[in-house]
Image (spheres, rainbow, N blue to C red):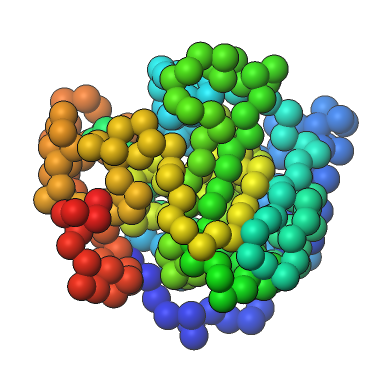
């Protein structure tokens, strides 16, 4: 069992996003004073605490260096090392997110306004990539459901559409038609509202680095990693299922749902086993678990569906 019930969260464990933002400003000031080396341990002011979420696995964490140096972010190149090398060119502050579509509160929101006064949580999630590797990452973020509820979607909103920044001046690979830019993703509304789904703003107690999707990315732990869209600039509430980027690129290889399923092979490789990053190339692979180990929590979302056809 990977998670506990909401009733186990104590009120004194909770802080709002405004308090969390104060530590970002403190870190910026510290860096200006030559104290940048200390910033990684300054999670928040002494008077505030980030909630240690019950929605966490107890598995061994992947090293910070591995998490931040082995990435897919095709806007910066197709090599796993390209994002770390080139993503520093992306400016992430200030950052705005456009909220559009079937909701009562559309508009262009500064990141701080979009997320405040929501609760910041640390959630340790297994992160599984379609290429056969996985990580265990301690994310910092807010429940996506809380953001959605504040935007008050109407009854016509059946899906949530997300879009990544696509700026060729900042993202060197945009000029190459590797994919159809901008990168887009989507979730069914019940998936978006599920308590496991978060908007991440950091990991390992630090703000997200650019290569990991700064300053705001989606994390959906029971799906393959390409569903967890990075550097979000647009959220739209729509009636119809969005055509997500990888499905548009190759519908035979990538589906809309992208639920982790060892019984559904990729056309070019099996999905039955995975290698944990950092364990060594010659280490024994682990068995891939249905829904990435979150079956007890999310299987009901797909009751009656053929998970082989709806992959």
Question: Observer-nearest residue: 196 or 263?
Answer: 263
Write the residue at 29% across / 38% down. Answer: 251
**Left or right position of 263 against 58:** left
Task: Locate residue 39 relative to residue 25 in the image: left or right.
Answer: left
Q: On the image, which quarter does residue 279 sit in?
A: top left
Which residue lies at the image location 53% right of the left edge and 24% below the top edge?
A: 75
**Of residues 232 and 273, the one drawn nearer to the viewer in this rendering:** 232
Residue 143, by quadrant, is: bottom right
Q: Is residue 294 above or below residue 139?
A: below
* Figure check: 82 above or below 27: above
- Which residue sits at x=63%, y=70%? 153
State the image coordinates of residue 245 (x, y, percent, origin top left): 43, 37
Q: Quadrant of residue 5?
A: bottom left
Q: Quadrant of the N terminus?
A: bottom left
Q: Residue at x 59, y 38 (%)?
A: 164
Residue 286 placed where, x, y %?
16, 44
Residue 92 visible in the snapshot: yes
* Residue 299 visible from this viewpoint: no
């Amino acid at each position: 069992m990977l998670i506990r019930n909401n009733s186990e969260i104590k009120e004194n464990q909770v802080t709002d996003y405004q308090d969390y933002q104060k530590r970002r400003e403190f870190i910026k000031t510290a860096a200006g004073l030559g104290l940048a080396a200390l910033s990684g341990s300054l999670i928040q002011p002494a008077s505030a605490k980030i909630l240690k979420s019950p929605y966490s696995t107890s598995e061994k964490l992947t090293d910070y260096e591995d998490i931040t140096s082995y990435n897919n972010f095709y806007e910066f190149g197709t090599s796993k090392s390209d994002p770390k090398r080139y993503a520093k060119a992306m400016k992430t502050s200030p950052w705005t997110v456009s909220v559009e579509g079937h909701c009562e509160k559309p508009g262009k929101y500064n990141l701080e306004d979009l997320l405040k006064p929501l609760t910041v949580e640390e959630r340790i999630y297994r992160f599984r990539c379609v290429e056969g590797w996985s990580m265990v990452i301690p994310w910092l973020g807010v429940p996506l459901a809380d953001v959605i509820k504040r935007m008050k979607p109407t009854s016509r909103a059946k899906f949530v559409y997300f879009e990544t920044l696509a700026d060729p001046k900042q993202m060197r690979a945009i000029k190459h038609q590797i994919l159809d830019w901008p990168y887009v993703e989507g979730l069914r509304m019940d998936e978006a509202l599920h308590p496991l789904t978060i908007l991440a703003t950091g990991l390992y107690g630090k703000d997200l680095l650019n290569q990991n999707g700064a300053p705001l990315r989606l994390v959906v732990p029971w799906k393959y990693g390409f569903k967890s869209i990075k550097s979000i600039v647009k959220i739209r509430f729509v009636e119809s299922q969005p055509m997500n980027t990888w499905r548009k690129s190759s519908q035979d290889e990538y589906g809309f749902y992208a639920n982790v399923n060892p019984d559904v092979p990729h056309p070019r490789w099996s999905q039955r086993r995975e290698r944990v990053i950092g364990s060594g190339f010659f280490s024994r692979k682990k068995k891939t678990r249905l829904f990435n180990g979150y079956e007890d929590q999310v299987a009901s979302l797909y009751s009656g569906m053929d998970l082989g056809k709806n992959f």
